Image: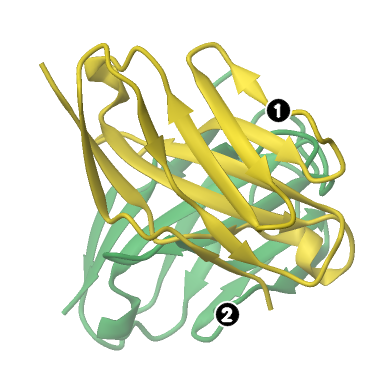
Amino acid sequence: AQTVTQSQPEMSVQEAETVTLSCTYDTSESDYYLFWYKQPPSRQMILVIRQEAYKQQNATENRFSVNFQKAAKSFSLKISDSQLGDAAMYFCAYRSFSGAGSYQLTFGKGTKLSVIP
Amino acid sequence: NAGVTQTPKFQVLKTGQSMTLQCAQDMNHEYMSWYRQDPGMGLRLIHYSVGAGITDQGEVPNGYNVSRSTTEDFPLRLLSAAPSQTSVYFCASSYSANFYYEQYFGPGTRLTVT
């Protein structure tokens, strides 16, 4: 079974600065998807960014980018120019490309990000 | 579009009571699923459905039943509530089971079992 580990329970960043959230995963599969979700205090789960394992190019979405290291099984999220609205829980998630595991997301335990004005 | 809606937002049950958490989506999505979120944990899959009439178990299915008689609705039933089922429950849907398509989450239901 796949596992997802987020080793930083809490992080903080100054407004306008850059922060990197870490995620590692364990899998024997070669094709899969990785995701970062944001959960603000409203509890709504919001997709931030996703990465297909077969793509070597790191995904970017505006101020959000990832550093995907397939050999190291690492998938970190970088938030640039942090804003107060970025304060939330961030979850890393894994999904198999095919087979039974393709029907579910496996989540890490989350990192709580605080943004300091 | 309302997206994914869940009712109720909050619920308190006594041990042994039964109830149904409602989930509906108006996006004509094939795939729907239920997750639970416990403190200090990520979301864990309870049950999922890849289309009307088709359901399957996820990682933590015990104590829960589902059915999918229509594309729009995917209710989650607790047959005999236990304190271990105290959690926040999320329903999600996507265009298909192919996760290339984004999953949309509902706002969650906070359930407390005393």
Q: Position of residue A11 (x, y in %)?
A: 24, 42
Amino acid type of the residue that numbered disc 2 sits on in the rendered structure: Pro
Relative to residue A34, is residue A62 drawn left or right?
Answer: left
Q: Would residue A40 be visible to someone looking at this image?
A: yes
Residue shown at 76%/44% (left/top)? B71
Chain letter belonging to callout 1: B
Q: Quadrant of residue B56?
A: bottom right
Per the image, the residue denoted by label 1 is: B27
* Mark-to-mark CA distance, 1 and 2: 26 Å
Q: Position of residue B84 (x, y in %)?
A: 31, 83
Nearer-N-terminus badge (1/2) = 1
Relative to residue A105, is residue A16 drawn left or right?
Answer: left
Checking the image for residue B74, the label placed there is none
SS state under label 1? loop
Q: Quadrant of the N terminus of chain B?
A: top right
Q: Quadrant of the C terminus of chain B?
A: bottom left
| In the depicted structure, whether residue B82 falls above or below residue A86 | below
Q: Quadrant of residue A4?
A: bottom right
Q: Residue at the far left: name it.
A: A117
Residue shown at 37%/60% (left/top)? A7
Per the image, the residue denoted by label 2 is: B61
- The colour applied to the residues of chain A in this rendering is yellow
| In the depicted structure, whether residue B1 falls above or below residue A19 | above
Q: Position of residue A111 (x, y in %)?
A: 33, 49
| In the depicted structure, whether residue A6 falls above or below residue A113 | below
Q: Would residue B3 be visible to someone looking at this image?
A: no
Residue shown at 25%/59% (left/top)? B11
